[in-house]
Image (cartoon, coloured by chain):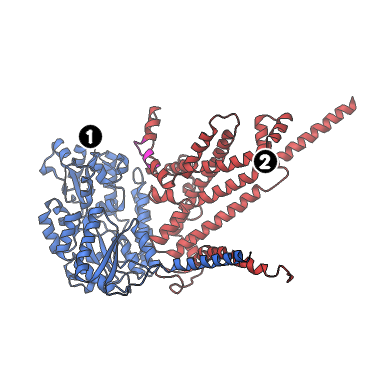
Amino acid sequence: MSKGIRGAEGRYGWLFVSPAILIIGVFLVLPIVLALYVSLSNWNGLGSPLGNSDFIGGGNYAKVLVDTGLAQRDFGTAIRNNLYYVIAVVPLQTALALFLAVQVNRRMLKGRGFFRTAFYFPSVTSSIAITTIFIFLFTSSGAVNQVIGWFGVNGPNWFNDPRGILAPLTGAVPGDGPLGLDWAAWLSGPSVAMCVLIILAVFTTSGTFMLLFLAALQNVSGEIEEAASVDGAGPFRQFFSVTLPMIKPTLFTVLTLGLIGTWQVFDQIYLTGGGDPGKTTLTPAYLAYETSFANLKWGQGAAISFILFAIIVALTLLQRWVLRDRDLGASGVRRQKRALERLKRDAAAGAQR
Amino acid sequence: MKYRKWGAALLAAGVVAGLGACASGGGDSSGETKELSILIGTSGDAETQAVQAAADAWAADNNAKVEVVVASDLTQQLSQGFAGGDAPDLFYMSWDQFATYASNGYLEPYAADLPNAGDFYPALSDTFTYDGTFTCAPKDFSTLGLIINTDMWAAAGLTDADIPTDWDSLEAAATKLTTADTVGLSFGLEYARLGVFMNQAGGRLVDGDTVTADSAENLAGLQYVQKLHDEGVLKWPAEVDAGWGGEALGAGKAAMVIEGPWIKGIQGDFPDTNYASYELPAGPGGKSTFTFTNCWGIPANSDTADSAKSLVEYLTADEQQLAFGDAFGVLPSTESAAATYAEQHPENASFVAGNDYAVSPVNFAGSAAVISDFNAQLASLVGGDPKAILASLQEELQAALDEANGN
């Protein structure tokens, strides 16, 4: 860097960013490094980890991932539960959010402000409050069961029902799967209780993501849609081939945020009894908390957190790869091929005439 | 321009200084007055006020100031305190966490030095003995009893002669009390209730260094519970829309429940429910019930350990324990105070009587995770295979016991 008129700027630059660096360093980077150390140590929670623990290498990770036993099975159960939660919640909340955003983005719709506020409302309410209300709604004689009772359906005891919803189909699958669970347990699907939490998550988060989609939709200018309809695209073709590709960056953001949020679900689990019924709502985030705070195995708890971190990063990268920028998707390539053939056919037919 | 630069630099310095100030909050108390904090998990205002009043009375005589802090989540707040080097000077230590805390060196082993160390029930002192050392003083105890709704009892045409004394008469009474709206018997589907039946059948979970969870006796206990449920005379509180047994009893959804002296707490919500408590009926292996207890924990190497010890001595004295019993219905942990309490509170006498043969639920370092897994597996007891549940418990508990013993 040349020392000229701008010579002192570097120094001032550092000075001005130093508060941010300091805050991030002290409250983010240092704790993460310390937690990483804890996950490799035998710290028992007494005093500071530095000086009160020994480095034991990957033992905590092995206990959760490799060694057969309760710790491994608990972790496997938590991963299974959370996997079903993610698989159900992320697509549902994204689709619902997009659907709602498109609806409230219509110019014809009367009272748009009201609907936008109404759909966004669950997102600004505390998740603790909403979960508590859900617990009351879904008791065995609660409002939900009374309503479905009008149709002659005898509703389950939602939050106390540990049966997996796929268990009737997959209950007989033999063999042992990974992480100490047999395949029947892996394939049993989310429990009835977990399904309520899935509904809860979709209900509360789709409003937030609706807002993101709405902002993106408003950036799609009317001329493009007009041009598409002049070219003869119907409303569906227009939406899937024109509008959706234009808001793809937002779609990526929503999917990523959804993925991260659902893998870290904690407060609903804490409030509904920490994994009850039958550990079918146990999640890795809650397991890490329980292992650390109740069983005082802080290293193991930190190890679970870092494995969860790795899972989230891996899935985000995978998703980025799937949604990477391509000129045409697989279906687009096929479509282009068909169009080209049609063109050639037409040209050949024209030449013969 | 120059002023603005310096202003920004000053602001940056200010933020740094401000952050630094946050880190070292609190002042040092080097005065004559000792300051102690007690962290409690309270059952309600009555308990909080009683503990505060007792602590104030002790503080007045000892030139001290005691602050009673009510925990919203005792386990979490304790862990946080210990990790931050800022543990409370005295706290409620529950029986199920005790071994985990003691084995990790969290607790000051002071109880054996107390002048009244020999006055406690032996079953309670044993619960809080780790590695041969009586570590912390039992605060009080609760045993499980059979709580009967007396109005329903009379309405079903049952008399005092029908009070269940064994499994058959319990089944008979539950059958008679079951109506379209009310189930005869209700208790939570967990080890803390079902374990009683396993013990009454003559079973034990641990015998020395060996786990005996998959014994025929334990199986008989679970099968008896399973049978009552199959007959429809027993339902879990969740099945009758109650949060716990007491709520089921109070709301008239169950005629009999298995709970402890804390049943008194339902009077606020259900003042019209009349009930009486009896000892649990005996099983084929004799009488048995569980005793649950808390102790007064003092953190290891605490500066205030001596003051805290003196406070514990005051709090566990017979007259103070009787005052607690009057205020919020806990049973005194010393034998002499418990005898007086039983005379003064005949409605709770059966709980005191139960402690003569009560055992503490299994409790060693690392057992809590296994028991919570057992509780989770019990969810499949109805229509499930109790033998498989016990086999899994056997395996996990033995592994945990071996680890606790360092094998």
Report the amino acid beneath label 1: Thr
Residue B317: horizontal and vertical position, in percent? 17, 66
Residue shown at the point (71%, 46%) measured from the top left: A326
- Pick the residue in front: A240 or A10: A10
Report the number of numbered marks: 2
Q: Quadrant of the N terminus of chain A?
A: bottom right
Q: Amino acid at mark 2?
A: Pro
Q: Could you tell me residue B320's position as x and y percent? A: 17, 63
Q: Nearer the viewer, mark 1 or mark 2?
A: 2
Residue at screen point 17% across, 57% down: B325
Chain A drawing hue: red
Q: Quadrant of residue B135?
A: bottom left
Give SS at disc 1. Answer: loop
Front residue of B342 and B76:
B76
Dot 2: chain letter: A
Q: Nearer the viewer, residue A283 or A24?
A: A24
* Residue indicated by mark 1: B179
> Which residue position is annotated with label 2?
A245
Q: Tag 1, which chain?
A: B
Is residue B6 found left or right of A45 in the rendered image? right
Give the residues in magenta.
Answer: A134-142
Using the numbered discs, state the Cα–Cα distance from disc 1 to disc 2 in whole angstroms.
Answer: 63 Å
Name which quarter of the figure residue A250 lies in: top right
- Please tell me which residue is depicted at 43% across the width and 64% down the height of the picture: A298
> Helix, strand, or loop for circle 2?
helix
Q: Position of residue B81 (x, y in %)?
A: 37, 65
Viewed as shown, does residue B111 lie left or right of A95?
Answer: left
Would residue A347 appear left or right of B302 to someone viewing this image?
Answer: right
Relative to A327, residue B18 above or below = below
The colour with which the image depicts chain B is blue
